[in-house]
Amino acid sequence: CSILVPDLFRGNPWTKDQPNTLFEQWIARHNPERIAKDITAWTEWLADEFMTAGVSKKLGIIGFCFGGGRVLEVLAQDQGDNDPFCTVNEIKNIQMKIDRGSKVVIFPGRGHGFAHRPGSLEEDDDAEQAYVIMRDWIYENLVV
């Protein structure tokens, strides 16, 4: 299993000790076009590494909070009907299996980012459970 954890913020993360009044200024410095190019470059690099090594054609991209939204935006731009990594037939096969491979888990009462920055022991337990669920899903659906 290969895992790549890119830094979308290039060493300039938002930290909880910063005043919320500076958030909009901070986020504006992280250009969506640059981030989209970074995600695309990392994805293409990792897919190429997989193909070269003959490891797997399965590739999962996961993002939380800010990164999750950026990943969805990048994937929505793809011209999938002529994609050598994921053919139309593969997509049709995925559509038939989507219910089996999909998973939605709701953690009642939890706010945005609880898995990244738990604010209580209860949230910490749920965060741990969320990561275990994610890890297990990846193992069951992506690992060859």
Image (cartoon, rainbow, N blue to C red):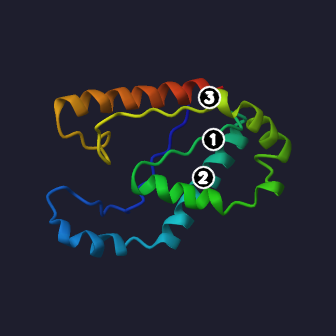
Q: Label 3's element? A: helix
Q: Residues within 10 Å of mark 3 (few under 14, many from 20)?
A: some
Name which quarter of the figure residue 81 lies in.
Answer: bottom right
Nearer the camera: disc 1 or disc 3: 3
The answer to whether 63 is drawn above or below residue 127 in the figure is: below
Q: Residue at x 28, y 37 (%)?
A: 109
Residue 12 location (% of width, % of height): 30, 64
Sequence-wise, the earlier of marks 1 and 2 is 2
| Secondary element at image label 2 | helix
Q: Do the residues bearing badges 1 and 2 touch, measured as CB atoms within 8 Å?
A: yes
Mark pair 1, 2: CA separation? 8 Å
Contact between labelled residues 2 and 3, with CB atoms less than 8 Å apart: no
- The numbered dot on residue 59 is 1
Q: Give the percent coordinates (x, y) of residue 13.
A: 29, 60
Judged left or right of residue 126, residue 95 is right
Q: Residue at x 50, y 24 (%)?
A: 136
Viewer-proximal residue, 56 or 137?
Answer: 137
Residue drawn at (46%, 48%) of the image = 63
Indicate the amino acid at tag 1: Leu
Query: At x 30% / y 29%, what residue is drawn?
Result: 126
Q: Amino acid at mark 3?
A: Asn
Quadrant of the image containing the C terminus: top right
Q: Mark 3, mark 2: which one is toward the viewer? A: 3
Give the amino acid at mark 2: Thr
Which of the marked residues, 1 or 3, is nearer the chain's N terminus? Answer: 1
Examine the image and state in which quarter residue 8 appears.
bottom left
Query: Which residue is labeled 3 in the image?
Result: 141
Compared across the picture, whether 79 is left or right of 113 comes to: right
- The quadrant of the picture occupied by the N terminus is top right
Dot 2 corresponds to which residue?
43
**Which one is nearer the viewer's eye here, 37 or 109?**
109
